[in-house]
Amino acid sequence: MSISKEEVLMAAAADLARSVDAIAILSFLDSMPMETDIPVIWVKEHQPDLMIKKSMQELLLFCEHHILDAVVQYHLRTEVSQGKIIGVFPFAILIYDVGEGRDYLDLASYADIVTPDILHSALALALEIAHEGREGRNIGTAFIIGDGSSLLARSHQAILNPYAGHPLSVCDIRNRENWESVKEFAQLDGVFIITKDGYITAAGRYIDADSRGVSLPSGLGGRHMATAAITREIPAVGITVSESGGLVRVFRDGVCRLTLRSEVALTR
Ligand SMILES: Nc1ncnc2c1ncn2[C@@H]1O[C@H](COP(=O)(O)OP(=O)(O)OP(=O)(O)O)[C@@H](O)[C@H]1O
């Protein structure tokens, strides 16, 4: 029986993983060729055909982008922040460190506004919304995190607030059990207001901050402008999920500080 190229690559990745004591293998292969003793997470939405006839340099750049995106997602999903990861592509096997994903996010640089654990939860949720959409369509939304009353003073309800009158327990963004309803309300017009303590106080909120002079890449419209603007007016962190591009962006001080691509997605 002949062995497929994918089986050879996966066997080599598993050997390498054992020898460097890696915690997981992120597989960019087309299919899951076999079981290994190291946890394998399959990365979806990879299009290997795009890579045909690319130069070595282009392939390396491709690997670099994709492994970083996947490792950032691994870190956000598992909360593991160090350890070696093996990335296996149809044309390369890489050793990477989860710490690179953690350093790329640099959540500590927002700690004067919101603690890293709350920001971590909000980002993981934003990426899930970017990946999953709702009922087969993409969803755009934003989370604005900061001092609750200052945020409310610079915004108004676009629709009835679905979080009004609910116990704090169902508003805690750190609790994954609450994420399903956030995904549901993300379809509403407007943004979510989240306190520094991680509680969602409102959804369907329209931001009133003055966006004149805010400078953003072309193509970004009202939601991104308003998010940037409110983070310029007060100490706040804004996380946007773009309906058009599937990108998650993080704003503070009126500028976009971090962009996460959602084109690769880890399987469950
Ligand atoms: N000031 C605002 N506050 C809250 N939400 C807003 C504001 N301005 C626009 N939006 C919301 O953003 C939605 C999308 O608007 P627009 O396409 O201009 O934004 P965008 O920044 O390009 O976002 P996307 O990339 O998701 O399309 C609007 O339907 C509206 O719900």
Image (spheres, grey):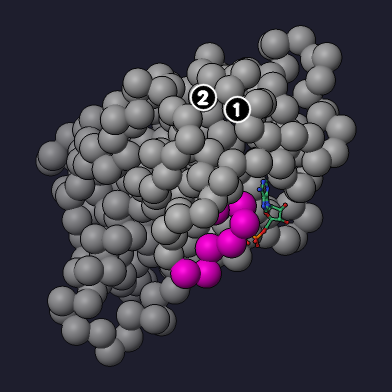
Tell me, for residue 101, which label it has, or none: none
Quarter-of-image position of residue 12: bottom left
The residue depicted at 48 percent of the width and 23 percent of the height is 118
Does residue 204 appear in the picture of this structure?
Answer: yes
Tell me, for residue 146, which label it has, or none: 2
Which residue is the site of mark 1? Answer: 151
The residue depicted at 58 percent of the width and 23 percent of the height is 150
Q: Which residue lies furthest to the bottom in this view?
A: 53
Q: What secondary structure is marked by label 2?
A: strand
Does residue 10 appear in the picture of this structure?
Answer: no
Say what amino acid the circle numbered 1 marks.
Answer: Leu
Residue 96 x %, y %: 20, 47
Quarter-of-image position of residue 36: top left
Compare residues 3 and 58 and report the one nearer the observer. 58
The alpha-carbon separation of the residues under discs 2 and 1 comes to 7 Å
Compare residues 24 and 119 and report the one nearer the observer. 119
Judge the density around disc 1: few (<14), some (14-19), many (≥20) Cα neighbours within 10 Å: many
Of the 4 image quadrants, the one containing the C terminus is top right
Contact? badges 2 and 1 (CB < 8 Å): yes
Residue 170 x %, y %: 72, 17
Compare residues 143 and 221 and report the one nearer the observer. 221
Magenta range is 218-225
Residue 105 x %, y %: 32, 39
Tag in front: 2 or 1: 1
Q: Which residue lies furthest to the left in this view?
A: 19
Compare residues 44 and 243 and report the one nearer the observer. 243
- The stretch drawn in magenta includes residue 249: no
Looking at the image, residue 115 lies above or below residue 4: above
Left or right side of 118 for 162 = right
